[in-house]
Amino acid sequence: MRRALATALLSCVCSAALAQPAQRPEVETAARALRERVIAWRRDFHQHPELSNREQRTAAKVAEHLRALGLKPRTGIARHGVVAIVEGGRPGPRIALRADMDALPVTERTGLPFASKATATFRGETVGVMHACGHDAHTAILMGVAEALVQMKDRLPGQVMLVFQPAEEGPPEGEDGGAPLMLEEGLFRDFKPDAMFGLHVFSTLPVGAIGVREGPLMAASDRFRIVVKGRQTHGSRPWGGIDPIVAAADIVGSAQTIVSRRTDIARLPAVVSFGAIKGGIRYNIIPDQVEMIGTVRTFDEEVRRKVFADLRNVAEHVAAAHGASVEAHVPDTRGNPVTVNDAALTARVRPSLAAVVGADRLIEPPLQLGAEDYAYFAREVPSMYFFVGATSPGIDPVTAPSNHSPQFMLDEQALDVGLRAMLQVTLDYLEGTPRTP
């Protein structure tokens, strides 16, 4: 009996081993050949970052590379977007792959030899500029994938649209941009993908791991702007005016109850955060007004609308209690919807990711309150978006400097993992779903 059980267990183990998906040999070959070039591209972009809607140099480098591969890129989409199509030599499906190109108004403090020293103007102030979110890696990875696909295009089934997107971090105030503007300008008008894929390097995962989950993945993201209007007076005579600073402080405190006391976070999380408060210029003058900006993160459209209404209500009534008034722009701009991974597509692609890193390194992350305008693409076509671990061995991903930190540090092995994963996903999908000519 024991011998029979042992034999059965051994048979199961062997079957499981045989069922373990394998990385394609052409992926291995391409990754080895492209490794150093992808690193060089990433370092170049890292040293020369550009803010949202200002990605002129980055877009030019991408377009130059695509032309050198024999492709015919379209440029200037949503200002600096670059798009090209790899035509396979056999019939097959249409897919799209996306990489974002923009950097952040962050002054780098990594000490890297290729650290950014760039500066720019953001909201009227001179700021440092840094690829603190890893978009330099995304762009370099997709450039590598593009080269690999072109080299095998004669035997490739289907077509692959390469989407190099500007302004994922959000266009400057008063401008449109990013994924929604690419769609408005006809990204999918003549080429509607059967599926779309995107990735993001992630500090909270160790290098060598990939994170993916079906359904909601990243939160809806919205900005707000609240201007509290008082009446200026001397700091020694506060009763002679209306203090917008005290009113603003009270609004910030009261707004915390929107999530803690008015939103059912047992079902899905939500966040209301203030990111900047500006008012006054001198120590002994109570100013006329205070401006506050911040963000709302939600996973449910009904909750999203309710948080907006609650925030406007708090701002207006708390200000009124102080004798002040407000202009409450909630939301202030078009935000990002929830990023949702198509369940069937995610289930289908999961083995491809496991083939690259191993099933034990394929992780289902919790809901992420970070946001992505990739969500607009995911509303148009079945999509799957995944995370690539970026934190080096020996460093706890929980405490590692996060994406958007001036000390965000990418382990460049993530470039290799990202390229292999995106290429494996692409080839497996194309080969697995023949398209009628």
Image: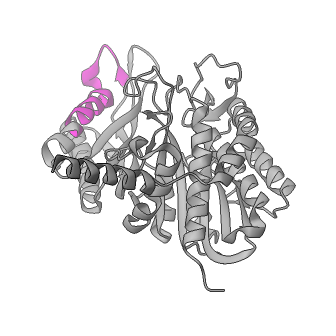
Q: Quadrant of the C terminus?
A: bottom right
Please name whichever residue, 362 or 159, is drawn nearer the observer in this view of the structure: 362
Examine the residues drawn in magenta and state their main secondary structure.
helix
Question: x%, y% of residue 119?
Answer: 68, 28
Question: x%, y% of residue 418?
Answer: 58, 44
Question: x%, y% of residue 80?
Answer: 71, 53
- The quarter of the picture where residue 260 lies is top left
Quick check: 74 left or right of 388?
A: right
Please name whichever residue, 168 or 32, is drawn nearer the observer in this view of the structure: 32
Vertical relation: 43 (above or below) 286: below
Q: Which residues are magenta?
A: 233-255
Q: Is residue 227 magenta?
A: no
Please name whichever residue, 284 or 315, is drawn nearer the observer in this view of the structure: 315
Residue drawn at x 13%, y 43% as measured from the top left = 261
Q: Is residue 248 magenta?
A: yes
Instruction: Give the farthest residue toward the left.
Output: 261
Residue drawn at x 32%, y 27% as measured from the top left = 245
Asked whether residue 373 is in view, the answer is no
Residue drawn at x 27%, y 34% as measured from the top left = 252
How is the model colour-coded?
one colour
How many numbered circles does the render carry? 0
Question: x%, y% of residue 406?
Answer: 53, 24
Residue drawn at x 44%, y 66% as measured from the top left = 345
Quick check: 329 left or right of 121?
A: left
Please name whichever residue, 165 or 159, is drawn nearer the observer in this view of the structure: 159
Asked whether residue 293 is in view, the answer is yes
